Image (tube, helix red, strand yellow):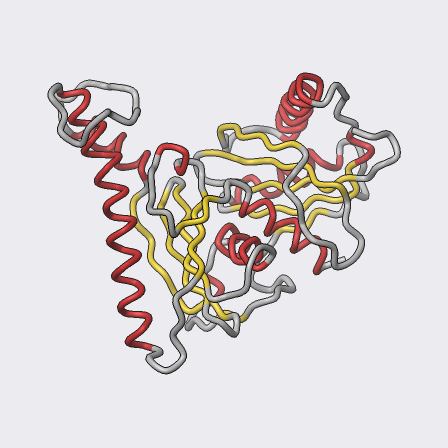
């Protein structure tokens, strides 16, 4: 980290994993770039603020020393922008950040946070902060409409029309949930590593499990995408336009989707950074 540069810390706290990203501080309507550092670790709802602070310090120091030959300096963190679906951690995170700087601004994104799109939903307050950040991330990359897939603990689909407005979507069990549930409920199936087999036709229990879980999830993503597009077109026959397709999430590296999808691992973090610009 340059000793004179200020940074923003963006945290996407999911049910299973947390993703942290460091961005150079942005002070106007600058283009949001990719983070200079991006780290992923398990979410622990029972961690203390001291433990969280120590953990963040350690993993960022390890990453920056190994990749950028520099150290992580907390005093250079100007503000934090957070999307969290684990409410019991919100206070912990805020206290952890204040260990070094008690005045560090910490923005928790929600449906009341200033944004660049509408929420055309009957109960907008139910929408998760990660999905809000994904929309802002997509808007930093392209013009709407969008269809966004996020393959995490749950696999979510978000539809954003050309206004732009969030018009709906779908939520399905995630890849890891399906994988673990199958092994827990089927007593004769043993634990194997979730890897891509060479063919959809497995010839061992291990490869059949891998094929069935991974490739059926891919088929679900493609099929659900087509179904959503069909219904979207019926709802808005005169204004419907083929969207730009984005895919993100911690399980996306295991999946193979058709070429129409733009794979953006940092979509949520980019969206959080954009929220930081909008709320200065």
Q: Nearer the viewer, residue 8 or 245?
A: 245
Q: Quadrant of residue 116?
A: bottom right
Total marks placed: 0
Q: Position of residue 261 (x, y in %)?
A: 40, 50
Q: Nearer the viewer, residue 279 or 233?
A: 233
Q: Quadrant of the C terminus?
A: bottom right
Q: Is residue 237 left or right of residue 264?
A: left
Q: Position of residue 1 (x, y in %)?
A: 78, 29
Q: Is residue 218 left or right of residue 82?
A: left
- Image height of 118 relative to 197, above or below: below
Q: Quadrant of residue 61?
A: top right
Q: Position of residue 236 (x, y in %)?
A: 35, 78
Q: Residue at x 50, y 44 (%)?
A: 264
Q: Which residue ends up furthest to the front in the rendered image?
A: 259
- Image height of 75 relative to 25, above or below: above
Q: Position of residue 111 (x, y in %)?
A: 55, 62
Q: Nearer the viewer, residue 219 or 277?
A: 219
Q: Is residue 253 left or right of residue 25?
A: left
């Amino acid at each position: 980290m340059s000793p004179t540069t200020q940074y923003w810390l963006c945290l996407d706290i999911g049910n299973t994993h947390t993703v942290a990203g460091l961005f150079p501080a942005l002070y106007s309507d600058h283009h949001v770039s990719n983070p200079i550092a991006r780290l992923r670790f398990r979410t622990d709802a029972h961690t203390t603020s001291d433990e969280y602070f120590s953990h963040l310090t350690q993993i960022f120091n390890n990453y920056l020393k190994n990749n950028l030959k520099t150290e992580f300096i907390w005093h250079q963190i100007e503000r934090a922008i957070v999307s969290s679906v684990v409410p019991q951690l919100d206070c912990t995170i805020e206290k952890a950040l204040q260990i070094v700087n008690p005045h560090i601004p910490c923005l928790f994104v929600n449906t009341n946070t200033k944004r660049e799109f509408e929420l055309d939903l009957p109960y907008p307050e139910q929408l998760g902060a990660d999905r809000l950040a994904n929309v802002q991330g997509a808007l930093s990359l392209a013009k709407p409409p969008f269809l966004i897939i996020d393959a995490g603990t749950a696999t979510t689909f978000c539809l954003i029309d050309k206004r732009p407005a969030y018009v709906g979507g779908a939520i399905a069990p995630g890849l890891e949930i399906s994988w673990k549930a199958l092994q827990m409920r089927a007593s004769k199936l043993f634990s194997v590593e979730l890897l891509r087999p060479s063919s959809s036709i497995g010839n061992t229990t291990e490869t059949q499990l891998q094929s069935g879980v991974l490739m059926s999830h891919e088929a679900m993503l493609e099929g659900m995408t087509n179904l959503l597009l069909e219904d979207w077109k019926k709802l808005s026959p005169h204004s419907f336009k083929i969207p730009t397709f984005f895919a993100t999430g911690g399980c996306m590296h295991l999946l193979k989707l058709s070429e129409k999808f733009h794979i953006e691992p940092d979509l949520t973090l980019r969206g959080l950074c954009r929220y930081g610009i909008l709320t200065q």
